[in-house]
Image (tube, rainbow, N blue to C red):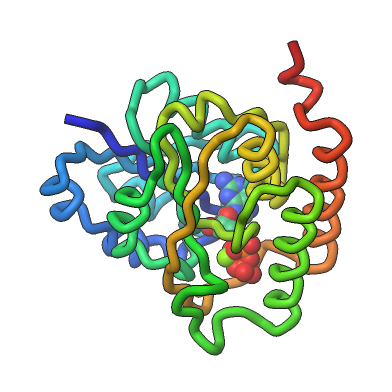
Amino acid sequence: MPSLFIMLPTLDEEKALSDVYNRIPFSKLNKMGYDCRVVIVDGGSNDDTLEIARGFDCEIIEQWGEGKGAGIRQAFKLFLEKKDDVLVMLDSDGTYHPEEIPNLILAIPENGIAIGDRLHGNLASDAMTSKNWIGNQLLTWLAVVLHGKAISDLCSGFWAFSRKAIEDLKLNSMRFEIEAEMYTSCAYNNIPITHVPISYSKRVGKAKLGSVKDGTSIARKLIIRRIFPVPHEERE
Ligand SMILES: Nc1nc2c(ncn2[C@@H]2O[C@H](COP(=O)(O)OP(=O)(O)OP(=O)(O)O)[C@@H](O)[C@H]2O)c(=O)[nH]1
Ligand SMILES: [Mg+2]
């Protein structure tokens, strides 16, 4: 039976986490043949996120260092150690719809990645500020201009990966540049990508991403990876 590793990154998500967990369609995924493991990777929450997480049937990583990128890379390491077959990650803030996990898994290309596309999907009118919508479009455009590989929503937080894709990714991002770096690594390591239109709702609780500061770091990462495609830690 193939095994599915569902990763939920959290930082102070006490208001949204229970609903996200309870909406994971476990019985549908079991019927599709997957044995599921949920892993919550926490970036040092100061609210009741960890207490809530301990009430679920899941594993918890209390990450070293700060930032979503550091947490995701630590979860990828655990995934490789556990020898699971497929990994799905989605934010725990109530924006993505766990019911759509099967659609993403079914769309994973051989040895590749399926990315949930909010910008051509069912985007709720109150889900994204116009500043963030413009920022997402500009960053996606910049990514394609610099790296040449098609992508339609660079900053999506809903991705599904084959095991081979995770083995091939070369990453060193600490914060919100992680998705941009996963894309550049796909471009340089010939990892196939498909896009799946998804639903996107207004977040529950407070955003951790500062749009201008983090948008600038994402743009900087895209430029650095045009010059140095592989992070120095991963060079042979
Ligand atoms: N493990 C971990 N998760 C984090 C960290 N910072 C944020 N997250 C989680 O990463 C996800 C994305 O963070 P958000 O604040 O929603 O950022 P965003 O989705 O880009 O921004 P919004 O559109 O404003 O929601 C959420 O589930 C956060 O709880 C961190 O340092 N470590
Ligand atoms: Mg969010």
Note whether 83 is above or below 33 in the view shown: above
Which residue is drawn at the image coordinates 30% and 38% (left, top)?
4
Splitting the image into 4 quarters, where does residue 153 fall?
bottom right
Q: Position of residue 151 (x, y in %)?
A: 61, 56
Q: Is residue 66 above or below residue 138?
A: above
**Relative image position of residue 114 (x, y in whole percent):** 45, 49
Side of 106 where 194 appears, left or right: right
For the C terminus, which image quadrant?
top right
- Please state which of residues 52 and 140 is positioned toward the viewer in this rendering: 140
The reply to whether residue 46 is in sight is: no
Image position, residue 213 (x, y; %): 84, 61
- In this view, the residue farthest toward the top is 236
Q: Nearer the viewer, residue 190 or 35?
A: 190
Q: Is residue 224 left or right of residue 80?
A: right
| Quadrant assignment for the N terminus | top left
Q: Total label count?
A: 0
| Near-viewer residue (27 or 207) | 27
